[in-house]
Image: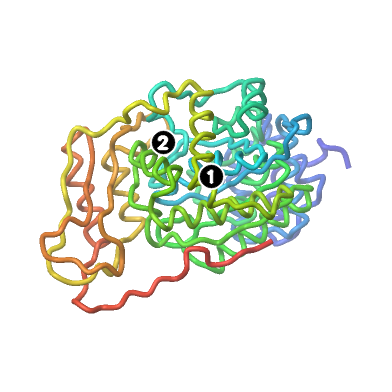
Amino acid sequence: MSRDSFDAVEVIVAKRDGHRLSDAQIDWVIDAYTRGDVAEEQMSALTMAILLNGMDRAEIARWTAAMIASGERMSFAHLSRPTADKHSTGGVGDKITLPLAPLVAVFGVAVPQLSGRGLGHTGGTLDKLESIPGWRAALTNDEMMRQLEDVGAVICQAGSGLAPADRKLYALRDVTGTVEAIPLIASSIMSKKIAEGTGALVLDVKVGSGAFMKDLDRAAELARTMVELGTDAGVSTVALLTDMDVPLGLTAGNALEVRESVEVLAGGGPADVVELTVALAREMLAAAGKPDVDVEAALQDGRAMDAWRAMITAQGGDPDAELPVANETEQVVAESDGVLTTLDAYAVGIAAWRLGAGRARKEDPVQAGAGVEIHARPGDTVRAGQPLLTLHTDTPERFGRAREALASGVVVGAPGTTVTRRPLVIDRIG
Ligand code: URA
């Protein structure tokens, strides 16, 4: 069948009635939608039918391939080093890319980390790095390739040429209640990663209140689907399922998270941030053919810090510059003696966002210094009046709404209460 032999209603009805879509139908509908020949309302009906009736493995693979074909494909084949990339499905305090990319680069594996800005309660990697004076996110492909060859790590804005079908489709899904369909999430993420041309990919699929996926079974299904897509496309792919009920580390907010990342690169930092950075680095290095290297040593002896400094400098940033701090702070204190039983990642994410660390609309600016600093973790014994959190913002009228977000998300239980948490790395798929 030729590409122009379908009409959109026929494709919608097929999926509405629970049938699988043919390769030709998928190729046609993605191409016609990207060109504007399938209307937004028709694509929204089709995505809803996909959400309700699902797609099988072959359909998802074809849908992904069609989205890749909508734009350019990059290639790192000419680099002298193997490449490995990481993608996180997003969480609160998730600054792992910042220490991870230079750490992996230390071992001769190039890390092309094409990232985005934050929308909603999870922060964006580019927003965090933009709090470093002078640092710039937009690089040409040539600049990116040169930096990968010279420094080994680059974190920059994804060009608009990668999977343009996804950009259009994602914006539509966002306003039609169809973001949550696993076939659509998996194909959206993997089309961009496969088009980017990385040789190896490690997925950090977050599970919990602060994540996209609240439920372990669905997160595992998403992880499996993405690993299959990557593997079938010749990308060495594994996924870790990691906990996101509690924020990662002790900060959520742009400059606050950069400061904490630098602590990790200096051999310190919160234990959970170090644990996840090391676990993901090991996976990336193993997937890129370097399984037996001492990752922790590179954090302790300054090699990862040197790579960080080179990476920031190459993009115009000053790694020695003072980071911005917010004009105003307020503390959230324990109201009674006891044990901190809950520090809900979603609540902290919303609070940081309301303080100005995130944006409500794509075009909004973010405040570099805004966010939440965490002083106690679940399981810690606390005394009445002890600071649990410090809220940072340039605009103090935001404190009230941030406190509202935290009202039921920070709970002090009776003295002696035991708190059990699942492990940070819950499972590995691949
Ligand atoms: N991130 C993406 O890039 N796409 C999705 O569909 C969801 C999260």
| Residue for badge 1 | 100
- State the quadrant of the C terminus: bottom right
Give SS at disc 2: helix
Numbered tag placed on residue 312 in the rendering: none
Q: Where's residue 79, x and y in %? A: 74, 31
- Which tag is nearer the camera, tag 2 or tag 1? 1
How far apart are the two marked residues, 2 and 1, measured between alpha carbons?
14 Å
Q: Secondary structure at mark 1?
A: helix
Task: Return the residue at label 2.
Answer: 128
Give the residue type at disc 2: Lys
- Can the viewer see residue 367 in this picture? yes
Eyeballing the image, is 27 above or below 275?
above
Residue at the limit of the structure toward the right, as seen here: 1
Query: Residue 30: in sight, yes or no?
Result: no
Residue 91 placed where, x, y %?
44, 51
Measured from the top left, where is residue 330 in percent x and y? 16, 45
Residue shown at the point (46%, 62%) measured from the top left: 243
Choose between 2 and 265: the one closer to the eye: 265
- Residue 211, located in which quarter of the rendered image? bottom left
